[in-house]
């Protein structure tokens, strides 16, 4: 059986300059404590036996440890330091794992605190049943335009597009091999790194519109609202 | 000067079978009254002199009139009946207007109640300053995948894509001519209808991440939260 063990990497290494708040978004208060705690807690509630690794910017490591103590947050998550880009951060985490070839490695954005057990299990179970690389995705609801080489833009058929979320799930040997092949700044998610490597194709499972990525300050309140409805 | 008068068409003709609630989303309660009232009120607050036209499914017209009476909602908006598709609904509204060639016609989704004065004026003023067709758009924040002809999917470069919102603003002669050219079911917004007509290119102005389209039931609560922060 594929997937003796599940490793979950939580990417939270941003220094948050784009968020417009004093703290990077993963540390902003959500229901009274750093948002990242909710993310970790919800992943843990789905797979309490999983090995959790959180990738942090070194400047925020001691603050995180202090916050965990202050909030009596006791879910064990190994800390790995982030790198210059998201790719380098995930690479550091992968290099730190003691993973067997047929383990499952999942990678999740720290800034998606509304992740559900359902979506996490859906992605993991797709790998258990033989897929190499699995991403959750949802339909695009707004119309989409694409910039053209001439500086203008053109409409595209949105029914052919999907918004990609995390957690993304991989057979360990697949994601480890894909990251061995090196850095390309065009990649914005892990599945595309696997895809570009040519190792395997990417499978889609249903995502969840409630699984938002906190991007703007208002999204913290939106996440709180979603969590209040879900539980 | 272009834009002696401003006409705003609010498209709210859906019968809402996809929303999963007893009522179509535009009539669901937002802060205690049908969502559509907030949309209309916010458009009116930006351009109180504009002529408002709301497109409704005929089955809901009497309910809307009753609700307006019950909530003492007195902003005047002409009612036009919707058609079989969004295109037909907008066409009905355009046909009902008494618009001069150089008036401004704006088209807005009834299900975007968080529309701001800023975004409305930004789009209108771009037409006043000489653009023929203007849409607000925001960067795409999730990674995007596109389905391929073989049934799979592939990553695309999300930095080249924008999410298109409403209100969309047009020189009257432009949008009226574009709709004279007939129906194509591939169109999901009015700017793409203008673009396909070949009459002019489409200009982009900055959209607003808070200008959400209510798509899922949770979005009603999210809209209420956004409105509580904005005012």
Image (cartoon, coloured by chain):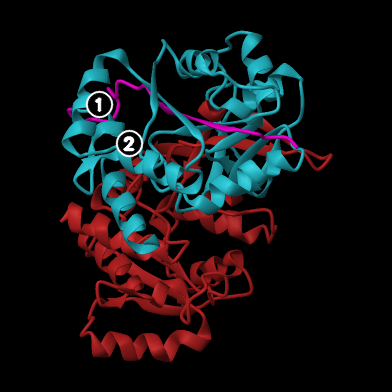
Chain colours: A cyan, B red
Can the viewer see residue A139 in this picture?
no
Left or right: where B207 falls relative to B203: left
Disc assigned to residue A64: 1
Q: Tag 2: Cα neighbours inside 10 Å, few (<14), some, or many (≥20)?
A: many
Please give the name of the residue rendered at 21% of the width and 28% of the height, measured from the top-left corner: A23
Residue A17: % across, % down: 27, 22
Which mark is drawn over residue A36?
2
Q: In which quarter of the image is residue B190?
A: bottom right
| Most foreground residue, B221 or A11 | A11
Label drawn at residue B38 = none
Crowding near pointer 1: few (<14 within 10 Å), some, many (20+)? some
Chain for numbered disc 1: A
Quadrant containing the C terminus of chain A in the rendered view: bottom left
Q: Secondary structure of the magenta portion, mostly?
A: loop
User: Which residue corresponds to the image point at 49% horizontal and 18% vertical from the top-left?
Assistant: A93
Q: In this view, does A130 lie to the left or right of B19?
A: right
In x, y percent, where is residue A29?
21, 40
The quarter in which the N terminus of chain A is drawn is top right
Extreme residue in the right direction: B150
Mark 1 and mark 2 in contact (Cβ < 8 Å)? Answer: yes
Q: Is residue A18 magenta?
A: yes
Q: What residue sits 63% from the left and 21% below the top?
A: A193
Q: How many marks?
A: 2
Label 2: chain letter = A
Please state the extent of the stretch shown in magenta in the rendering: A1-22
Observer able to see residue A160: yes
Q: Is residue A144 left or right of residue A74?
A: right
Instruction: Please report whichever mark, 2 or 1, sits nearer to the chain's N-terminal start.
Output: 2
Q: Nearer the viewer, residue B20 or B208?
A: B20
- Residue at point 66%, 37% (across, down): A134
Residue A128 place in picture, x, y as percent = 70, 40
Q: Is residue A131 above or below residue B24?
A: above
């Amino acid at each position: 059986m594929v997937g003796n063990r599940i490793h979950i990497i939580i990417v939270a290494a941003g220094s948050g300059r784009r968020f417009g708040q004093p703290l990077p978004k993963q540390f902003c208060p959500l229901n009274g404590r750093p948002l990242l705690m909710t993310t970790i807690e919800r992943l843990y509630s789905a797979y309490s036996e999983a090995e959790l690794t959180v990738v942090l910017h070194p400047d925020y490591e001691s603050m995180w440890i202090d916050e965990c103590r202050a909030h009596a947050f006791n879910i064990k998550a190994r800390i790995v330091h982030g790198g210059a880009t998201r790719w380098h951060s995930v690479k550091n985490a992968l290099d730190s794992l003691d993973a067997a070839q047929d383990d499952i490695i999942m990678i999740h954005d720290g800034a998606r605190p509304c992740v559900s057990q359902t979506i996490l299990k859906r992605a993991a179970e797709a790998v258990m049943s033989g897929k190499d690389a699995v991403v959750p995705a949802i339909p695009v609801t707004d119309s989409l335009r694409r910039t053209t080489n001439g500086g203008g833009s053109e409409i595209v058929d949105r029914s052919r597009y999907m918004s990609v979320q995390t957690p993304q799930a991989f057979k360990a040997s697949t994601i480890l091999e894909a990251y061995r092949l090196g850095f390309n700044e065009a990649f914005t998610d892990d599945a595309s790194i696997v895809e570009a490597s040519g190792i395997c194709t990417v499978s889609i499972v249903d995502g969840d519109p409630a699984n938002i990525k906190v991007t703007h300050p208002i999204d913290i309140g939106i996440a709180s609202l979603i969590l209040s409805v879900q539980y």
